[in-house]
Amino acid sequence: METVYYKEFAVLAETSNFWEASERLYINQSTLSKHIKAMEKELGVPLFHRTTRHVSLTKFGEALLPYAQSITRTEFEYSTLFMQLKDAEKGVTTLGSIPVMAQYNITGLLNAFQKEYPKSTVKIIEEDAKRLSAMLLEQRCELIFTREPKPSAEKHSPEDAPFVRIPYLTDHMVALLPAGHPLAARQEISLRELKDERFCFIKESSLMYELCTNACQAANFIPEIAFTSHRLESIFDMVSYGNQVALLMNRHITPVKNAMLPPASAWSVVDIAPRIYSQISLCYLKDKKLSETARNFVDFCVQLSKT
């Protein structure tokens, strides 16, 4: 039996719907149905009860599911390992990073490294900070540039953390206010002063969304969130129209050359007091030997931080 069939079976068991499973697997429904029928024929038992819209596992399907998940997981793990070994031989490493690479000068750092090590290659995967840690644990990348709340970053001791953390930058939360807002001329404000505002945040399920909502709740109010987006320029644009405010990190506001953004005069940046910090760190797994390229990149970052 093709091992890919086990993955398809597990996804269909999770979704209980041929259409949704085929969409997730990037195959058509007839192909998925053909593969499931082939499994049932080879095993000699029905794996699913079928209706016009949904499917459910039979007792045989329920018995098979944990083995199918184990086979799928094992195949992913050895495929990932082989890919990493081949990449290491070619001088390639994979770096996961928070999306705002330019604002945090991560792109500049990567460019400087490539000039210093022209035979090495760093592949980049952009993801939200909440996904990056999982990706590192799953060994989908060797290194990550990730964001954590400052207290959270400080509490991890070498004994209890699976990662080695190299501090890169500290950032703090700011309010982005329309230019005509009554508080726009202030140097700093408390979050409590914004309790009656309509907010736009970076998208739900992101670490920034969590940081902002937690900060508002700590200031004893539930924010009215009118807009969310993963694109900073959309948030800048919404604030520039004058009816919403945004909570971002200070580095988010750093101008990016040639970016299509509204003029800065359309809004004002005001510090939040007391300060709410986040820590950007370069991380890698503590118990896994780094490839030569990854080790060189870590050493390069450490040396650069000392200059």
Image (cartoon, rainbow, N blue to C red):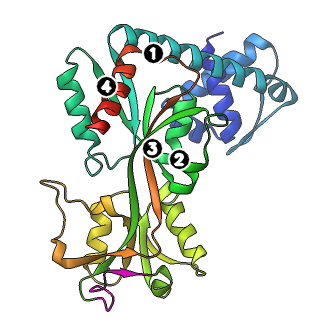
Find the magenta span and give its range: 181-189
Kindly indicate the quadrant of the structure image that contains residue 197: bottom left
Q: Horizontally, is 77 left or right of 228 in the view?
A: right
Within 10 angstroms of label 1, few (less than 14), some, or many (20 or more) residues?
Answer: many
What is the secondary structure assignment of the residue under circle 2?
helix
Give the mark nearest the N terminus, 4 or 1. 1
Rounded to the nearest whole Å, what is the CA distance between mark 3 and mark 1?
A: 21 Å
Give the main secondary structure, helix, strand or loop, of the magenta stretch: loop
Q: Quadrant of residue 60?
A: top right
Which residue is tagged 4?
A: 122
Residue nearest the viewer, comparing 146 with 41: 146
Say above or below: 107 vs 279.
above
> Would you name the residue on which mark 2 appears?
130
Query: Based on the displayed image, in which of its 4 quarters is residue 262 positioned?
Result: bottom left
Amino acid under disc 2: Lys
If the image is split into quadrants, where does the C terminus sit? top left
Give the camera-side residue of 50 and 174: 174
The disc, 1 or 2, on the residue closer to the chain's N-terminal end is 1
* Distance in Å between CA atoms under marks 1 and 2: 23 Å
Is residue 229 in view? no
Q: Secondary structure at mark 3?
A: strand
Q: Are marks 3 and 4 in contact (CB under 8 Å)?
A: no
Residue 227 in the image: x percent, y percent? Answer: 42, 71
Q: Earlier in the sequence, mark 4 or mark 2?
A: 4
- Looking at the rendered structure, the kind of residue marked 1 is Gln
In whole angstroms, how far apart are the C-alphas of marks 3 and 4?
Answer: 16 Å
Look at label 3 and name its amino acid.
Thr
Q: Residue at x 21, y 39 (%)?
A: 108
Numbered circles on residues, count: 4
Residue under pointer 1: 84
